[in-house]
């Protein structure tokens, strides 16, 4: 939590205003932040200075791992986070590649579970990584990437957290996640949960101990219409101790995650937080 608040304060103190053409808004911006999550120690990086809808964040990540392409599937799982980008983004609404209402296009898990090769076949990157890790293999390239510049026009948005690189040291699993662009008040609140969750669940399924997760953020920003709430409300609050994330131990395979898992398989213990803050969302 401290590293999150330090980043927010750094943006307020040192950020530079940058015009963003896509949203038509200005963003107070810093470049580079490195966050670390102690998954072995069970320190769940949940924001406590406002109420965090952590289940929605986990649902988003499960949707990516399942390769979901429709905001309707994300909704069924328990998150509405893709509704606006799928249905209210003018450039995407005009795209010939959009399949219809709720389509987010070839983004995130669609890329990671079905990487397009030159000969037209597809590679399931996640399946390969899980098979390797389960056998204790780390080929120094266990990378789940969602980034394919050749097909950006087939998606409503380019992936923000676009690479998850797993590593084994003995039987301890590590994760390095990279994010190119970060809406710190809204997106990061979810992305921290997702990086922690991703290492915890992949370690559980592959039978490894979870170590640390390292989260690199390149462009970290606060939109102009979020600044006052962050500076004058959220940053004035005192954080509470970190809660614990509880994952159903019956989740043992990738198929479990793909088929029967719901948000009821996750819980947090000891979550004390300040009241909710509704930050504006930019499409
Ligand atoms: N501008 C922008 N910021 C983002 O963080 C973001 C995007 N766009 N587009 C793609 C995804 C969608 N994400 C989202 C979308 C909405 C919320 C949001 O509204 N969160 C609220 C309520 C969540 C809920 O009730 O489930 C929050 O208070 O955290 C968060 C992340 C993250 N990403
Ligand atoms: O997981 C996510 C997804 C998106 N974001 C934010 C970062 C930016 O504010 C927008 C994406 O806009 P681009 O113009 O494509 O950079 O969404 C996030 O923080 N986390």
Image: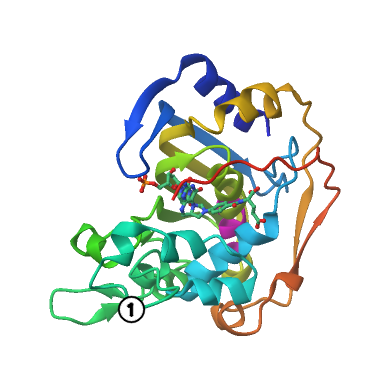
Residue at the disc numbered 1: 99
In this view, the residue farthest toward the top is 13
Of the pair 95 and 28, the residue shown nearer to us: 95
69 to the left or right of 111: right
Residue 33 in picture, x, y percent from top left: 47, 31
Of the pair 51 and 217, the residue shown nearer to us: 51
Residue 1, relative to residue 62: is it above or below? above
Of the pair 182 and 199, the residue shown nearer to us: 182
Residue 106 in picture, x, y percent from top left: 33, 69
Determine which quarter of the picture holds residue 158: bottom left
Tell me where the magenta segment starts and ends, as one range: 195-203
Residue beneath the point at 68% across and 55% down: 54
Mark 1 CB lies closer than 8 A to ligand 1:
no
Residue beneath the point at 78% across and 51% down: 244
Determine which quarter of the picture holds residue 227: top right
Label 1 SS = loop
Disc tally is 1
Quadrant housing the N terminus: top right
Residue 154 in picture, x, y percent from top left: 26, 67
Residue beneath the point at 53% across and 77% down: 73
Determine which quarter of the picture holds residue 124: bottom left
Residue beneath the point at 85% across and 42% down: 272
- How many residues crowd mark 1 within 10 Å: few (<14), some (14–19), many (20+)? some
Regarding residue 6, the answer to whether it shows in the image is yes
Residue 183, relative to residue 197: is it above or below? above
Residue 194 in picture, x, y percent from top left: 57, 54
Regarding residue 248, the answer to whether it shows in the image is no
In this view, the residue farthest toward the left is 119
234 to the left or right of 218: right
Q: Is the magenta stretch mostly helix, strand or loop?
A: helix
């Amino acid at each position: 939590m401290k590293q999150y608040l330090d980043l927010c304060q750094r943006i307020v103190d040192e950020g530079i205003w940058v015009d963003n053409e896509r949203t038509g808004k200005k963003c107070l911006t810093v470049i580079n932040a490195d966050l670390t999550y102690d998954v072995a120690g069970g320190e769940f990086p949940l924001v406590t200075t406002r109420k965090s809808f952590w289940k929605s964040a986990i649902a988003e990540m499960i949707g990516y791992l399942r390769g979901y392409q429709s905001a309707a599937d994300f909704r069924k799982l328990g998150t509405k986070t893709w509704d606006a980008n799928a249905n209210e983004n003018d450039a995407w609404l005009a795209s010939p590649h959009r399949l219809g209402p709720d389509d987010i296009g070839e983004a995130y898990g669609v890329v990671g579970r079905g990487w397009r090769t030159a000969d037209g076949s597809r590679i399931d990157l996640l399946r390969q990584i899980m098979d390797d890790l389960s056998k204790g293999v780390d080929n120094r390239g266990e990378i789940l990437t969602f980034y394919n510049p050749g097909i950006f026009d087939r998606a409503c948005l380019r992936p923000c957290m676009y690479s998850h690189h797993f590593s084994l040291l003995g039987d301890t699993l590590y994760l390095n996640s990279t994010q190119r662009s970060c809406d710190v008040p809204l997106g990061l609140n979810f992305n921290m949960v997702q990086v922690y969750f991703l290492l915890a669940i992949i370690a559980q399924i592959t039978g490894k101990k979870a170590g640390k997760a390292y989260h690199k953020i390149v462009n970290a920003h606060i939109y102009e219409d979020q600044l006052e709430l962050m500076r004058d409300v959220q940053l004035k609050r005192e954080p509470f101790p970190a809660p614990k994330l509880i994952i159903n131990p019956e989740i043992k395979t990738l198929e479990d995650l793909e088929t029967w898992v719901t948000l009821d398989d996750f819980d947090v213990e000891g979550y004390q937080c300040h009241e909710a803050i509704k930050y504006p969302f930019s499409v």
